[in-house]
Amino acid sequence: MVSRVIPVDTFDLVIFGGTGDLAHRKILPGLYRRFVAGQMPEDARIIGAARSDLDDEQYRTDVRAALMEFVDRRLHSEEHFAAFLSRLHYVAIDARGDHGWKSLHELMRDGVVRAFYFSVAPALFGDLAERLHRHEIADEASRIVVEKPFGRDLASARALNATLAQHFDETQIYRIDHYLGKETVQNLMAVRFGNVLFEPLWNSQYVEHIQITVAETVGVAGRGSYYDKSGAMRDMVQNHLMQLLCLIAMEPPSRFDPDAVRDEKLKVIRALEPVDPADIVRGQYRRQGDIAAYTDDVEDLDSRTESFIAMKLHVSNWRWAGTPFYIRTGKRLRARQSEIAVVFKDAPHSIFGASAGRHRNILTIRLQPNEGMTLGVTIKEPGPGGMRLIDVPLDMTFADALGPDNDEVPEAYERLIMDVVRGNQTLFMRGDEVEAAWAWTDPIIEGWQSRDDRPLSYEPCTSGPEESAMLLHRENRRWREIRE
Ligand code: BG6
């Protein structure tokens, strides 16, 4: 395959929390993959910063172990490991004290992009931002990257935004939602706005309903203390599913530029109607055989946090009035399957008569696994026997389209980190978007709390509680199957 890797400017990337789980699993493996793809400039440097007292060599050993574990074996190479690790440095730092900041100041170079990844608890964001300035490490050209959870309600998100705004301009703040870095998610914009075929039909006149599913097989063991305070609503819906919904529902931006795209997404969030409690199904997985129950995983037998949620939403504007959006996400479901399905209306009149049955065009956008898109179209069943109609998929599976050698397709994190270095905020959430998403989420959660709502229990390895199916059945619709 011809290399399509576009080099980026050289950089000093400081990862606060550089010995943490996210750095090990996602950030450093992502950077390594970009390095192997040839995208990292010769003299780019990565500086881990954390509390532990390590030197450069010890940090390199720590990162090497992470690469061995979290990078695909096909990319393991002693030569690449050595060259990548030689770009790594380490500073032991106290986020709330003075230790280490002078060393970091001395390490940073002038004339290169400076980016600071806050892979730490949000409670430390303010301390880091303030010290970066006090020690003259960050300037008006520097960028900071922050992770979710970005607040746990509107008030805390506002407070976080205000803290960051004391030290950094909005154009310097990169709020990561890794779903926006997924290949298919970006392709969704290419398909909608790069073709003449879809956009004229992309409205309530032709779209019967839309489904967004993010199903996972994993449970929450090991991260129960975080998850139990969040639940599926805060952990997945307020950010990942909301972003997917925005990209599906938004008006065409005038340009593919950060503010044009984010302005349109914001309008969608603000057009979301409050949700009727009868249109929400919350679930919690129970024990089954060797699979522990949610309440065991979080070590709270009385937990009322949801590990599954399904909802019916309405975007109240001219384009979408009357077209429901059904969204669902959950842990310990039958399969890991994330997809968006745009279900088009029936043809207004069937010239083939009732015996031809009902056929609908469905555009399925698969985020994972097996990324790609499928458009179901109706054709005549080949051969003799009269006019019988069948549905066949027009299939664009990316792996097939790109050929077997598609390792160059970057994963979400690596793409987003390179966008930080490029200074492109299009795929990052703006502060007002995050706040608007919480403004919509808060009353829903408060409603559960005031009603003392208990999630329904569901069996692991299924599609969630039966009531989730009912949400659609009662309107003569059906979820697409979650398949192994
Ligand atoms: C994270 C959530 O943001 O996204 C996790 O905190 C979830 O609970 C994960 O498992 C899903 O990401 P992906 O890329 O595996 O679909």
Image (spheres, helix red, strand yellow):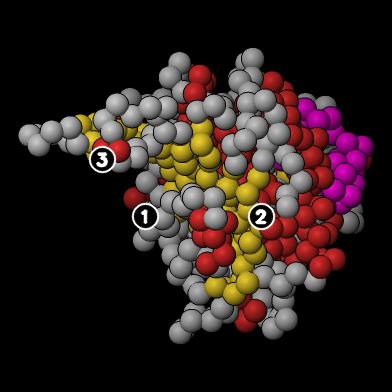
How far from the left and from the top, in percent, is residue 453? 75, 69
**Circle 3: element type:** helix
**Circle 1: element type:** helix
Res 132 → quadrant: top right
The residue carrying mark 2 is 279
Q: Residue at x 85, y 34 (%)?
A: 168
Q: Is residue 158 magenta?
A: yes
Asked if one can make out residue 434 in the rendered structure from this viewpoint, the answer is: no
Q: Is residue 449 magenta?
A: no
Q: Amino acid at mark 1?
A: Arg
Q: Nearer the viewer, mark 2 or mark 3?
A: 3
Asked if one can make out residue 202 in the rendered structure from this viewpoint, the answer is: yes
**Circle 2: element type:** helix
The residue carrying mark 1 is 73
Q: Quadrant of the N terminus?
A: top left
Tell which circle, 2 or 3, labels the residue nearer the N-terminal end.
Answer: 2
Q: Which residues are magenta?
A: 153-175
Q: Amino acid at mark 2?
A: Asp
Q: Which mark is residue 355?
A: 3
* Identity of the residue furthest to the left in this view: 384
Q: Is residue 89 above or below residue 191?
A: below
How far from the left and from the top, in percent, is residue 108? 74, 37
Whether residue 159 sits left or right of residue 224 in the image: it is: right
Q: Is residue 407 above or below residue 448?
A: above
Res 484 → quadrant: bottom left
Marks 2/3: CA distance?
A: 34 Å
Marks 3/1: CA distance?
A: 54 Å
Q: Main secondary structure of the magenta part?
A: helix
Q: Amino acid at mark 3?
A: Ser
How far from the left and from the top, in percent, is residue 458? 55, 73
